[in-house]
Amino acid sequence: MDTKTEVLVIGGGSTGCGIARDLAMRGVAVTLVERGTLTDGTTGRMHGLLHSGGRYAVSDRESAAECISENRILREIASHCVEPTGGLFVSKPGDSEEYFERKLAGCSACDIPTELLSAEQARAIEPYLAHDIERAIRVPDAAIDPFRLCVANAAAAREHGARIETHAEVTDLLLDGDRVVGVEITHSNDNGMTGSTERIKATHVVNATGAWAGQIGAMAGVDIAVRPSKGAMTVMNCRQVDTVINRCRPKGDADIIVPHETACILGTTDVEVDDPDAFPETQWEVETMIETLSELVPILDEARTLRSFWGVRPLYEPPETKTSDPTDITRQFFLLDHADRDGLAGMTSIVGGKLTTYRLMAERISDHVCDRIGVDGVCRTADVALPGSENPMHLQEAMESFELRSPIARRSVQRLGSRSSSVLSTSDPNPVICSCEAVTRAELEDAITEVGTDLNAVRIRTRASMGNCQGCFCAHRMAALLHPDHTVETVRTSLEALYEERWRGQRHALWGEQLSQAMLTRYLHATTMNRAQSQTESSPTVAFERFDGGDERGD
């Protein structure tokens, strides 16, 4: 099958979806393709920090200034995705006093608001902070839901005429001499089964695949020097803090705690890898996270670890600035015009950057693409709210409208934003399906209407199965909502994909109470759905057969 579009965007992360939205709002015909679900790459594997810029105020002031500017914009246009937690950079005995002062000076130079706090003032904000912290700097960090943000951008792009194709992997770039004229993609169904091939002709192709940009470039014979760097993150079972906690010291592993929804996410490590799809997920990273960050918040050492996951940073290093240490690579973004750089017209790549600056990255590359294809359009993404955040009073109005005394209803409204009325105003029974995250049937059915049988796509839109039980008590309930509109085999396959994804992150957390929780999940699903017959290598059945029964971390 052959189709046409003006601009073809490869990559369904925050940047790709932001580009699709920006171009579509300018009247450009856009098609976005993503090999998995939206957020399948780096966007779906980050710690959820909306940077104030304080993290880069010493080492990379250009990035810091971009962060605080975009932080302010996203609080306005994506309010239903942002929780204004605030952030603290805390100092302990032995931490450099000179670095602390440089942090303050750097924030001031980048227009990042700060407040100097004593140890007592910091602990008044976060009582579980260690008793030996000496002082802290308060900054406007925030938590952001990358899934909700990405989906909202894709929805806005679609509203303006864009075509969004998930489960569509680029297998080749189409060339006509020294010009890229499109892509060849292979469609798969929601559960990864190979399907049809499509050739999409395009006036211009945008490579927004992040850590995978080099692989796309290689299809056209151009070198894109992305240096993927993996980072481990560990999810704790509740919010030990309600403020982003940073260790105020130079670069290092395990120096941030981000409160996110019902949990806390500990981060992170920084290890260069060769392949963003194949790298070791090592136990030492998880242990380092818990042990080191327990120095800041001691109660973490007693908490239950839900899961760990690894993301891959799309670091780009211009050839003239090559360094041996990935932590020294700038977090700035780069626009690579392959016509000027490589003599290959029709394609531009965007590399580097971070989620906080995704909108700015999308604006810059959209300006460039419009110039290349002769479109006179102005960026409006900083001024127009995303779907769900159109009315800044949506939360209060929705709560008053629904008389929401229930914490379940409040959680629904916080997730749905201004879409609350259209989704929750139902005359049908609306029971809670996911108790941990307070997700109701109405929310799930709304997501299923959008994405079909892909339960992992449903998960990122609703947070169902992302709570304390990790799908133990709700995964099968989610799957049941697919029947009778879909076959039993489709429902079972969808459930398997969700269950395996949830299990994957728990493999590095099997000790103490989490081991008991995982065993409960295993026995419940084995006895009620005969899942003990699964022979998948990553399945809990295989893992528990190999487990030696140790109860300490690392056993």
Image (cartoon, grey):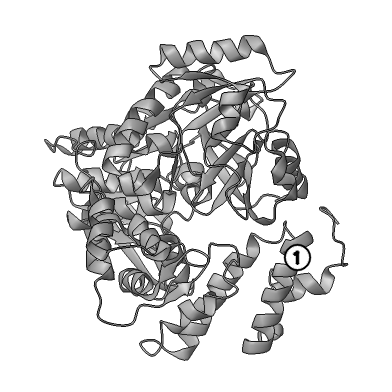
Give the quadrant of residue 165: bottom left
Taking the spot 18% from the left edge, 52% from the top edge, the residue there is: 29
Q: Quadrant of residue 232?
A: top right
How far across and down, in percent of the image, does residue 490 sit? 46, 84
Compared with 363, 442 (above or below) is below
The image quadrant where one finds the C terminus is bottom right
How many marks overall? 1
The N terminus lies in which quarter of the figure? bottom left
Horizontal and vertical percent position of residue 433: 46, 75
Q: In this view of the protein, which residue sits in the foreground, 12 or 388? A: 388
Decide if residue 269 is on the left or right side of residue 109: right
- Helix, strand, or loop for circle 1? helix
For residue 534, say whether it is visible. Answer: no
- Provide the residue designation for mark 1: 515
Circle 1 crowding by C-alpha within 10 Å: few under 14, some 14–19, many from 20: many
- At 42% from the left edge and 62% from the top edge, which residue is drawn? 407
Q: Which residue occupies 55% across, 41% down? A: 258
Residue type marked 1? Leu
Coordinates of residue 73 in the picture (x, y in percent)? 29, 34
Expressed as whole percent of the image width and height from the top left, the position of residue 529 reads: 62, 88
From this viewpoint, is residue 173 visible? yes
Picture quarter containing residue 343? Answer: top left
In the depicted structure, whether residue 416 falls above or below residue 486: above
Q: Describe residue 105's horizontal placement relative to residue 518 as left or right.
A: left
Seen as rendered, the residue at the extreme left is: 376
| Relative vertical location of residue 33 with respect to residue 390 in this rendering, above or below | below
**Front residue (pair 262, 490):** 262
